[in-house]
Image: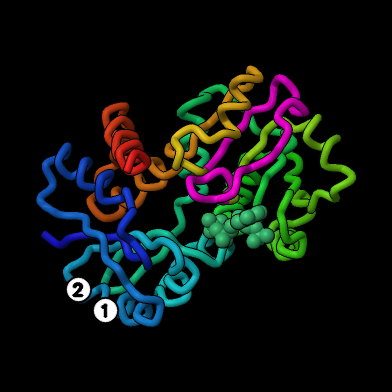
Amino acid sequence: MKKTCVIGWPIAHSRSPLIHNYWMKQHGIPSLYEKLPVEPPSVADFVRALPASDYLGCNVTIPHKENAAQQAAVVDDKVRKLGAANTLYVRDGKVHATNTDGEGFMASLRHDHPTYTFLGKRVVLLGAGGASRAIIDSLLGEGVAEIHIINRSIGRVVPLRETFGPKVMAVQPEHQQSLLESADLLVNTTSLGMEHEPPLTLDVNLLPATCLVADIVYTPLKTDLLVRAEQRGLAIVKGLGMLLHQAVRGFELWYGIRPAVTDDLTALVEADVLRASAT
Ligand code: ATR
């Protein structure tokens, strides 16, 4: 049976093999998921050669998500809108591209807070990169009322508004406090707070007691933002859930079985993150 893989540059630290190989073993599928370092100039060749290769498809990670979207023969609406793909699969000899990051975020939030409702909610979102785009798309799909973006480079919010419309707004510094005081959902999509990155400084005491706080950073497993939010009594969503849940659809597209994000799998990947943090 053909294999699957994740392509990126660098790729050494990817946890995707741990996730997919766990599911293959669980379902008795005789395949293998590998890490494949692909240099940026080689992405187009890799994608073109995919149908005749040893691979059924692959995940795509930094810095290849935009390039992969351009090289695929068939892209779905999400990839067209986001301009980035994280999952490629071969159908009838053609490379198809999709993006499961947004549904991964949403499924993770729903897993942790099954009764949470999005309709009419006010979101404050930190960051304006690729992850931000995927999450904005999903949140708008769930019917949130407004998404206010806080980003270091305020100019990056303009294209977001062009893609997603007037519900997406840049936060002016003088309005930041009042927006935090009325936020229903706060999401960090920046790398701030990640191990070896600068800290995220945001006063969680400004947030209302009903605000849900989500972080997509998962090294550490519980970021300082989430620790402080919990100390303040707020509900939280940790970042690892998005990584686990974004993988579900890819596995289903390649192997025809929709796998589950079990407590066992979560513990396995958490242990790997902790092990890496300790070294
Ligand atoms: P991803 O695809 O993971 O979203 P990205 O497109 O590189 O990655 O986006 C990273 C986000 O983190 C951006 O919002 C970036 O802010 P800028 O748009 O101003 O670059 C934010 N970010 C990264 N490092 C940061 C830092 N040191 N301070 C503030 N924001 C930072």
Is residue 173 left or right of 85 when viewed as pictured? Answer: right
Q: Give the range drawn in magenta.
A: 191-216
Q: Nearer the viewer, residue 80 or 209?
A: 209
**Residue 276 image-quadrant placement:** top left
What number of labels is visible? 2
Amino acid at the residue labelled 1:
Ala
Q: Residue 53 carries which label?
A: 2
**Image quarter for ligand 1:** bottom right
Is residue 263 left or right of 81 when viewed as pictured? Answer: left
**Residue 147 image-quadrant placement:** top right
Q: Nearer the viewer, residue 162 or 256?
A: 162
Label 2's element? loop
Where 119 falls versus 246 (above or below)? above
Amino acid at the residue labelled 2:
Ser
Q: Find disc 1 in the rendering and name its residue.
A: 49
Which residue is at a point 74% across and 36% down the rendered structure image? Answer: 122
Q: Is residue 221 shown in magenta? A: no
Which residue is at a point 11% across and 59% down the rendered structure image? Answer: 1
Q: How far apart are marks 1 and 2 (CA)?
A: 6 Å
Is residue 219 left or right of 4 when viewed as pictured? Answer: right
Q: Main secondary structure of the magenta part?
A: loop
Residue 181, position as x, y percentages in the image: 80, 30
